[in-house]
Amino acid sequence: MTHLERYTLWCQKATDKSVLDGLQAMHNNAAAIDNAFFKDLEFGTGGLRGELGAGTNCLNVYTIAKVTQGIALNMKAEGLKSVAVSMDSRNQSDIFSVRVAEIFAANGIKVTLSATCMPTPFLSYMVRQTQSDMGIMITASHNPAQYNGYKVYDADGCQLTDARANNMIGYIEKVDPFSVQSGNIKEYIAQGLVVYANESLTHNYMAEVLAQSVANTQEIQKANLKVLFTPLNGAGYSLIPTVLKKIGITDLHTVPEQSYPDGNFVTCPYPNPEKPEALKLGLELAQKIDADILIATDPDADRIGVSVKTCSGYRNLTGNETGVLITDYLFNRRIQNGTLPKNPVLIKTIVTTELVSKVATCYGAEVRNVLTGFKYIGEMIKTLELAGEVNRYVFGLEESCGYLAGTYVRDKDAVIASMLVAEMAAYYKTIGISLAEKMEELYTKFGTYSHKLVTKEFAGASGNATMKKLLDSLRANAPTHIQDIGVTKTLDYLTQTQLDLPKSNVLSYDLQGGSQLIVRPSGTEPQIKFYLTAAKTPNENKVVFEKLEKFIAERFG
């Protein structure tokens, strides 16, 4: 079926007004029709993610229905009977979550539904505590405002692994989105097929977060730390301020324009706390009120951005730096408190800084590397659990601002990360240093690791084809030098056998002098990500980055 034939079919069968409006808007626009219908929105280990709009390659009530019905059929084939559903603050998240609940209920699957927008880690907690067979989170995480998405979790509260997701695709592909039955949620509530999550779940979740604190309230209050928090109009708007107050942060402020859920993200169209522009409004207020620290979380409150006051202004910490600081703080304080387990374990992704390995090893920890994606950290926690060693787990992190202490959930959690960053900043303030100064201490002790993320966008049908062609070319013509830096080791994660890791579309190049380049397509956005590492002096690292970026520009445009 051609793109135009798909478009025509949708025009004939769609009844949803917002979808019909979108279809009408692209009438006689061949490029818009191609981009909306050149493929089905891909379902994978990250679920679905795409721009809101009409068409098979967009998020709308029909693409949501197709995937949900496919998952329901897969669940019934496997004898699974229950699912937990939640949502973040994005546009149409509330509509989609109800639609999802109705479709599962129409298939006889019992649904526990969150009544309000909540952090993604809460969904992981809800799955585990309600003993649901699966979980669905309506979110596009940190993507721009025009996106929404659909994450799928297993009974362990962990995002689906590759094998499980691939098994579902066959069921999903067979579903006609226009024939999916949903019914009315009020009827399902009356029948007991849909129940709203009990408020006690929220209280218990916060109690689990608070239990991971390694400080005490009096110690934190003594620091008189001034904290500025922004949820970037996302799902962290309520729980994070509550948790911060409970641990003893009394001088707490929020960015007014970003303090409540708003899927339009008017003041921050790209609500990714990794990006400096996302912190702009917060930094302006931080300077006015002289905050010690700014904490920002993304729309589904699973990632955190941090900026700290220094003598020369505010310094934005990278995701790697925040992770290294939390690691050092957790291990150090747990030794002081006598709670560090024997043979502790830290889990990190392959693109996360090796500096954190040096820090953790210094405390006697075993470091386990996994593929990019927090689901692999969750899977490794499960491995420890099955071996009866889950108490060994101390911390898991990824360079893209995702962190987890504790095993109460199996996904990254900005609620606990916010708590740990705040109490850590208070602890160091009581001994007269900032987080920035502590970071410099760690660089002095272990070496200056510099990291940079470069992305190249490949939007639409033509972009998707170009991205595949460029990656295939790089794989077929592996460089022996990147500019004048020799490549000492090439690792293709699609074909490698030396590491006990699943196959993944990732290429890694170790370079002379301890530098590294890792290349991988994003699993959630139409882009290729390039992870740059240099491990010399700051000035030498800058030169290395210039050479790596020149190579990227020449090979990828």
Image (spheres, grey):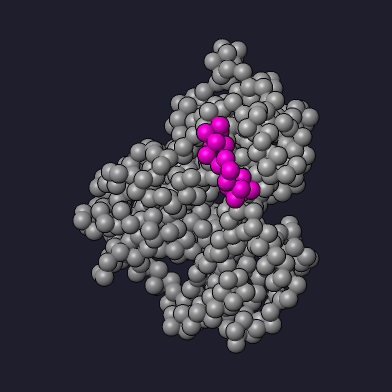
Q: Quadrant of residue 491?
A: bottom right
Q: Residue furthest front?
A: 28
Query: Which quadrant of the view contains residue 9?
Result: top right
| Nearer to us in this view, 363 or 467 | 467
Q: Image quadrant for the N terminus?
A: top right
Give the residue drawn at x 58%, y 43%.
28
Give yes or no for residue 294 being in the magenta stretch. no
Q: Position of residue 39 (x, y in %)?
A: 68, 46
Q: Is residue 519 above or below residue 111?
A: below
Residue depicted at x 47% and y 49%: 144
Q: Quadrant of residue 277?
A: bottom left
Using the image, determine if residue 511 lies above or below residue 297: below
Quadrant location, the C terminus: bottom right
Above or below, 229 relative to 554: above
Q: Nearer the viewer, residue 296 or 262?
A: 262
Q: Is residue 145 left or right of residue 358?
A: left
Question: In this rendering, does residue 413 appear at all?
Answer: no
- Residue 77 point in image, percent of width and height: 79, 29
Residue 319, percent across and down?
47, 61
Residue at the spot 52% in from the left edge and 67% down from the top edge: 454
> What span is colored magenta in the figure?
19-34
Q: How far across and how far down the image is residue 214, in percent?
A: 42, 51
